[in-house]
Amino acid sequence: MYFTGQVDSGLVNNPDKIAKLDTSDQKAIEWLENHHIFMMESVTERKYKLPDKNYEKVIASRVSGLKNPSFSLLATELQSFSFYNPTLNIMGEPYLNPITKNSVNKYLFLIEDTTYNGADTVFIISFRPYKEKNFSGLKGLLYINTNGYALQNVIAEPAVQDKDIIVKIQQQYKKIDGSWFPVELNSNIIFNNAQINNFKMMGIGKSYLKNIQINPDIENKEFSYIDTEIADDATKKDEAFWNKYRGDTLSQKEKNTYQVMDSIGKAEHFDRKLAGLEAIMTGKIKWGKVSFDLNQFLAYNDYESIRLGAGLHTNKSFSKWFAFGGYGAYGFGNKKWNYGGDVNFLINYRNDVSLNFAYQNDVVEPGVTQFMDYKTSLLSTAGNRQFYLTQKNDIEKIKAQLNFRTLRYLKVYLYGAQEKVDVTNDYYYRQKIDDQTTVFDQNYIFSEIGIAFRYAFKEKVIQTLSMRYAKPTRYPIIYAKIEQGIKEMDGEYSYTRITARIEKKFHIKNLGKPSFAIEAGIIDGDVPQHKLRSSMGTNIGGFLIATENAFETMLPYEFFSDQYASIHFQHSFGALLLKVKKFEPEFVITTGVGFGSLANKENHQGVTFNTMEKGFYESGLLVNNIIKLNFTTLGVGVFYRYGPYAFTKESDNFLFKMSLGYAF
């Protein structure tokens, strides 16, 4: 795959026209005639087995200007591998396949021509969406061979192109061992918003499929939850290896590209800059055999105020099977030192089996369930809730945990832990020991065993040399946790806490992007407030920032429950409602609903809080992207609290917040 400037061939072959151009354009044409802007090659091995087992390994990679091979994965993500799926993906966007079932109801087909391929006939058929149909469709040409009435060639592009990026794909098929199979995939991309002088930037990708084996003997154990990965020695292949797989030797222009871009990349530290991008995605900065934890450097919340610290762990350069590390931090608001450490053993890489031992002396928010491997998206505003944590308890915790993966998409966590909790506000728990003894307790010991789950159906995991990340799945992600408090090992409380959470984001063409998050739980047994469910409120007055999947108008810790359910829904219309030149605000509507109850509320004293038996309701409207400052966007939102728990003063039910986002 290579990127270059789109220079009209008529201009290149006409010296007189070139002579009339600006000097900078003349130099740009001369440079583009001898170099590409960017170029990469890769050799991959791919295995597939019905119904959905897939594995692709990059065994060789070369990227101009970079030693990091991560960019080699880009070419495999441009289009679907086959044109026979009901939905086709082009540049990450889904489109209805014109040859899927019932497509004749949505697409117009016309026979444009008929050709002959030996004894076989090839029908050339154009297709495009019917004008009155509103769906994500394609337009292009189908070449149907009467030998099996299968695709021999297809050229397609989105019927409605994005104004910034224009893309067109081609797939060519050949009959191999009695089956038609793709042998070449081509992608052409034009970037209308990126130019080299006055020439638009374009990308051209070509994938050639060779050494194809139909119905080989492949065992299930050859597949795992990792869909795509890069071999450790992918960047160390010599020219003899590359020449074995290249369709042709490198042209002089391609050799020039590698030579020049490698020199520029070394001088401008391209790999270091790419490592910075990976650090943002992983939260870790690699330095030799250790990696620094970015989330430990600086944080802010209402309870600790500014929190400064540092944390590091060993990485794969130290050992592939063993890692250890720790952190230390100081909260200036509560004037407390926090620290912790852990040791991790990777027992089985393929099935993600690991054993972890951890110690923690820190502060923790009461009333929140921490789901295993739960991460908020880099571009999500859900992380803003950290600003509104007005209450935390001092804890000392030891934990042992075994992780493993099963059923391909299910990750299981088995653990045992002991947690000592010291309450830091006026709350105390009234515990009746016997008829003569009642304890008003602010210090607890919880001994606990538990099991947790994360299930992401059809989730594809990509493994690079330095990081592992999951591509968004089209299905909901389910988290669940069962915690059993025991009175052995100094434990003071016996209880069962069951919690589940489900999240999903959609993309509906011409309607926008709806999403929801549902969480529910139940606690069997009397426990202090630390183990109850808090209300996730983010209304503390003053300067406020909108927060996804949280109650915007609810006060922090206004409600506590031992049985609860909540749903947060939002729908983004994107720029569908208003678009004036470069001004494209994003309109988002939101609604949050919560229910909860608490048995034996009289045992919880010292602070005032409520329960949500009657139901808590709020809705809001956000207008994002009003102002863009580099990669940051600013907007405004208004939220309204209503229902049984609305404030008496009507004006108090309205809350204005600023929306903070990111534009990449």
Image (tube, rainbow, N blue to C red):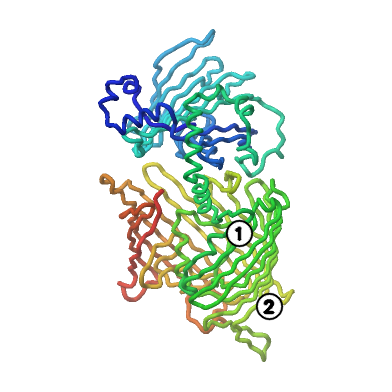
**In this view of the protein, can residue 418 be seen by the observer?**
yes
**Sequence order check, earlier mark of 2 and 1:** 1
The x, y position of residue 633, in whole percent, is 36, 55
Q: Position of residue 50 (x, y in %)?
A: 64, 33
Residue at 63% x, 33% y is 237
Q: Quadrant of residue 46?
A: top right
SS at mark 2 in the image:
loop
Q: Position of residue 388 (x, y in %)?
A: 45, 69
Badge 1 marks a residue whose secondary structure is loop
Describe residue 342's horizontal placement relative to residue 386 as left or right.
right
Q: Are marks 2 and 1 in contact (CB under 8 Å)?
A: no
Q: Please name the residue shown 48% across and 78% down the image.
A: 609
Nearest the viewer among 549 and 81 is 81
In this rendering, the answer to whether 625 lies above or below 358 is above
- Residue 351 lies, in percent from the top left, at 69, 48
> Of 301 and 36, which appears nearest the observer?
36
Left or right side of 155 for 526:
right
User: Local crowd at mark 1 within 10 Å, few (<14), some, or many (≥20)?
Assistant: some
Give the residue at mark 2: 492
Residue farthest to the top? 119
In the depicted structure, whether residue 405 falls above or below residue 153: below
Residue 613 in sight in this render: no
- Which residue is located at x 46 percent, y 11 percent? 115
Q: Name the residue tied to disc 1.
A: 372
Task: Find the distance from the CA under tag 2 to the CA under tag 1.
Answer: 25 Å
Give the label, 2 or 1, closer to the camera: 1
Amino acid residing under circle 2:
Glu
